[in-house]
Image (cartoon, rainbow, N blue to C red):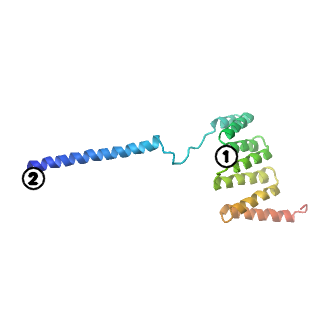
Amino acid sequence: MWGLPGFVLGAALGWASVYYGVMWASEGAGAAMQQIYHPSGHSTPHRREYSEAQALALRGLFREAIDCYETYVAEFPEDPEPCLGIARIHRDHLKRYDDAVIWLRRARQIPGLDAGREIFVTREIIEVYVGKLGAPERAIPELARLADRFAGTREGELAKLELERLRSERLQSPDA
């Protein structure tokens, strides 16, 4: 219907749509690659690895692993992982449960610790008292703290139930 001018116009529009379509797609791919290789810093933060201390612990060099973790504690005071690493070495390998509790509490006191991590660390303290030391009465303040701090949550309610159970056992025991 349009003849030669229609053919030229159609070819030009077709070429332009292909050209700009490819340009749009490549810009999108470039922006995606930019996000992958040069992140803005507004995404999930990088989680530090403490592989040197972990490797020492795996080789049974517990004192050296603790020294390495202590260096990390000084270098990254906002990260609870080095404190937890030290606590686990004391608890699982050296059987120094009171030292483990000290390091677990230190991890829990780090400012900005999220609620999930705080609950997790408090549960580890309770497990040391009940399971490792066989002193459930020492877990009572920790359970009370957990029940009070997280009242209305599943963890808070479970802590409250366990606290009531321990208190009733303590009242029923003949040496109480």
The circle drawn on residue 159 is none
Q: Is residue 95 left or right of residue 43?
A: right
Q: Residue at x 69, y 62 (%)?
A: 156
Q: Quadrant of the C terminus?
A: bottom right
Quarter of image, res 31: top left
Near mark 2 (Cα within 10 A), the count class, few <14, some 14-19 or many ≥20, is few
Q: Residue at x 78, y 49 (%)?
A: 132
In the picture as drawn, the residue positioned furthest to the right comes out as 175
Q: Amino acid at mark 1?
A: Pro
Residue 164 position, x and y percent, is 78, 65
Q: Residue at x 20, y 49 (%)?
A: 13
Q: Quadrant of the N terminus?
A: bottom left
Labels 2 and 1 touching (C-beta < 8 A): no
The circle drawn on residue 2 is 2
Residue in front for this viewpoint, 17 or 137: 17
Residue in front for this viewpoint, 142 or 54: 142
Q: Earlier in the sequence, mark 2 or mark 1?
A: 2
Residue 148 position, x and y percent, is 72, 63
Residue in front for this viewpoint, 39 or 22: 39
Which residue, given by chain and number where applicable, does mark 1 sit on? 80
Q: Residue at x 54, y 48 (%)?
A: 44
Q: Amino acid at mark 2?
A: Trp
Quarter of image, res 23: top left
Residue 147 position, x and y percent, is 72, 62
Instruction: Please say if 142 is above or below 104.
Output: below
Residue 38 position, x and y percent, is 47, 41
Instruction: Indicate the secondary structure of the residue bearing disc 2.
Output: loop
